[in-house]
Image: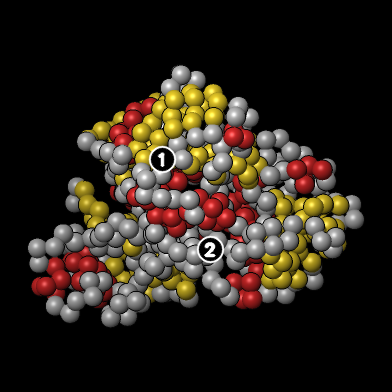
């Protein structure tokens, strides 16, 4: 299955992936309206320290602890992609407790969680973070 | 072809179905449960009363689950006997069903200690099942005074669920703090004060000495008038059937890492069992939904001839009260690192070069990175502990580890 992979030595720490993620999942078709004066809450997040930086998002694990531990059945694997049914999620955050990568976070209003779904549910269809990465520090491929 | 029988219909049982079907698509699976309902998530009953979910959305798996997995679901039927020698179970209807492999996932039941005068209380409730939730809901009125005995997870989630629908709520607990099995004193005090801001009153280090119809007299002498009584003192594993069949039972059903009981071809999972808590290297009942699922799945895979071990269990809880969240895991032993700022509170417990437990309240971001350190017994000198103790992050791992996490 195609996944997003990180090449940390190419990462500039520019945070564009975070903005592209937030825009892609905003449901808006104007980047300025989607992002200006908005505190973004992207599903991909950059870690940086002492000149090292890299992006972290859902690894779509084959043995996903988040899915197995989900108390509602809101998290499930659909064709290899771990998706959340926000309508079922009650925001208990058991998945945040479970995810070893720290790749799941509360959504904007805190009533449910959000996570990377490889942009399959938004208008992009393919990961917007990868498409907008200026230095190929994240790639979407089979490994 | 094997014949699988599963007793139960909650996380352990469903995990077992999914475990079996990950290996064996064809063998017969019969699932028997006393409750007549499609599998649903028990912890969601508080969210149901709160209006945050409904009966359709609280189904643990889609409507087509039994059909999709080719499961013969016998719902509303109760197993009254297990014969481990003949390999049969007997139902309350008298029907006898044979098995090649049996899953015992009977869960737990509310424990009500003997309390003087309890029989004089007309409107009293447990808070464990959908039926419990409906019974309580039918009595909720805008001016009802509710007395909850027990400030544990069940009692407090019940409080959250009904707070907007009743007049007043008082919670009594023998312990000196709320959530005694989950929080330390300092953390509990923070959460308590937040809950009190929602109008809930607490009587801690106290207990109900006796009941007189609509009045409770506490040990301290304090009297509390109430209209509805919720009993959330604790739960006990449902072990009687399997004990009678001859299985080894301590506090819960004893199982090994494959989730086998001491009886041949009988497996067990969930609240009725004991797990090996690797954070303290001890057997204990870990009545938690994620653990139940993983035990069930492990058992199912082994039942179907695969190989899987359930060998990294720890206590862990994610819980919110009125939007204030806490995540905890492991055991609270060893050296302590504390961080406090307003309503954010964090404590890490580490010992012998390992993280063994943590409490996070308020800011719970990326808590799972800590959970993983406990479960994997990661040596703390192999990571940048100074960095990670301030904030859970992958940067604290070696370059090689990071590559393993993110590039493989």
Q: Tag 2: Cα neighbours inside 10 Å, few (<14), some, or many (≥20)?
A: many
Residue B23 at x, y percent in the picture? 67, 68
Residue B373 at x, y percent in the picture? 43, 43
Which of the pair B261/B125 is nearer the observer? B125
Which quadrant: the N terminus of chain B?
A: bottom right
Single out the residue that lies furthest toward the top. Answer: B220
Which residue position holds label 2? Answer: B60
Is B75 rendered above or below residue B386? below
What is the number of the mark on residue A8? none
The image quadrant of residue A142 is bottom left
The image quadrant of residue B302 is bottom right
Mark 2 vs 1, N-terminal side: 2
Q: Secondary structure at mark 2?
A: loop
The image quadrant of residue B21 is bottom right
Badge 1: chain ID: B
Q: Secondary structure at mark 1?
A: strand
User: Is there any visible trace of residue A94 in the rendered image?
Assistant: no
Which residue position holds label 1? Answer: B145
User: Is there any visible trace of residue A109 in the rendered image?
Assistant: yes
Q: Tag 1: Cα neighbours inside 10 Å, few (<14), some, or many (≥20)?
A: many
Which of the pair B224/B81 is nearer the observer? B224
Residue beneath the point at 16% across and 59% down: A39
Which quadrant: the C terminus of chain B?
A: bottom left
Residue beneath the point at 43% across and 29% down: B224
Residue B316 appears left or right of A118: right
Residue B161 at x, y percent in the picture? 41, 50
Residue B111 at x, y percent in the picture? 61, 38
Residue beneath the point at 60% across and 29% down: B117
């Amino acid at each position: 299955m195609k996944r997003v992979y990180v090449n940390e030595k190419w990462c500039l720490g520019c945070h564009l992936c975070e903005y592209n993620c937030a825009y892609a999942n905003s449901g808006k078709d104007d980047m300025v309206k989607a992002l200006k004066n908005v505190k973004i809450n992207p599903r991909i997040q950059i870690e940086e320290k002492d000149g090292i930086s890299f992006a972290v998002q859902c690894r779509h694990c084959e043995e996903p602890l988040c899915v197995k531990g989900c108390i509602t059945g809101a998290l499930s694997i659909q064709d290899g992609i771990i998706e959340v049914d926000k309508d079922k999620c009650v925001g208990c955050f058991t998945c945040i407790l479970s995810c070893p990568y720290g790749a799941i976070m509360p959504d904007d209003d805190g009533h449910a969680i959000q996570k990377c779904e490889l942009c399959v549910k938004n208008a992009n269809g393919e990961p917007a973070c990868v498409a907008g990465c200026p230095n190929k520090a994240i790639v979407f491929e089979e490994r | 072809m094997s014949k699988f029988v599963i007793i139960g219909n909650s996380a352990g049982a469903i995990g077992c179905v999914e475990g079996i079907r990950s290996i064996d698509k064809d063998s017969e699976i019969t699932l028997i449960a006393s409750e007549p309902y499609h599998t649903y998530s028990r912890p969601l009953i508080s969210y149901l009363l709160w209006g945050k979910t409904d009966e359709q959305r609280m189904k643990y798996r889609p409507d087509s689950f039994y059909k999709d997995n080719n499961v013969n679901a016998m719902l509303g039927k109760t197993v009254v006997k297990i014969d481990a020698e003949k390999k049969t179970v007997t139902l309350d209807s008298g029907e006898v069903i044979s098995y090649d492999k049996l899953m015992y996932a009977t869960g737990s039941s509310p424990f009500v200690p003997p309390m003087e005068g309890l029989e004089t209380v007309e409107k009293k409730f447990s808070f464990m099942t959908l039926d419990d939730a409906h019974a309580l809901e039918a009595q909720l009125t805008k001016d009802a005074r509710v007395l909850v005995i027990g400030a544990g997870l069940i009692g407090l989630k019940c409080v959250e669920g009904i707070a907007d629908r009743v007049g007043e709520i008082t919670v009594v607990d023998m312990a000196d703090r709320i959530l005694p099995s989950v929080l330390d004193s300092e953390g509990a005090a923070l959460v308590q004060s937040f809950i009190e801001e929602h109008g809930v009153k607490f009587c801690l280090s106290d207990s109900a000495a006796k009941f007189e119809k609509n009045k409770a007299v506490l040990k301290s002498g304090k009297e509390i008038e109430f209209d509805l009584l919720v009993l959330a003192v604790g739960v006990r594993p449902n072990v009687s059937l399997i004990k009678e069949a001859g299985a080894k039972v301590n506090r819960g059903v004893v199982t090994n890492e494959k989730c086998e009981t001491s009886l041949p071809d009988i497996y067990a999972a969930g609240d009725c069992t004991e797990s090996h808590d690797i954070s303290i290297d001890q057997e204990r009942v870990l009545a938690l939904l994620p653990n139940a699922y993983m035990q069930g799945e492990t058992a199912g895979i082994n039942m179907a001839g695969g190989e899987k071990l359930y060998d990294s269990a720890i206590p862990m809880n994610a819980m919110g009260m009125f939007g204030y969240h806490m995540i905890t895991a492991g055991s609270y032993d060893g050296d302590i690192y504390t961080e406090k700022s307003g309503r954010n509170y964090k404590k890490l417990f580490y010992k012998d070069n390992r993280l063994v437990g943590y409490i996070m309240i308020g800011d719970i971001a990326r808590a799972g990175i800590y959970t993983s350190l406990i479960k994997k017994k990661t040596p703390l000198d192999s990571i940048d502990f100074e960095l990670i103790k301030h904030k859970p992050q992958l940067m604290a791992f070696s370059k090689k580890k990071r590559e393993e996490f993110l590039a493989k």
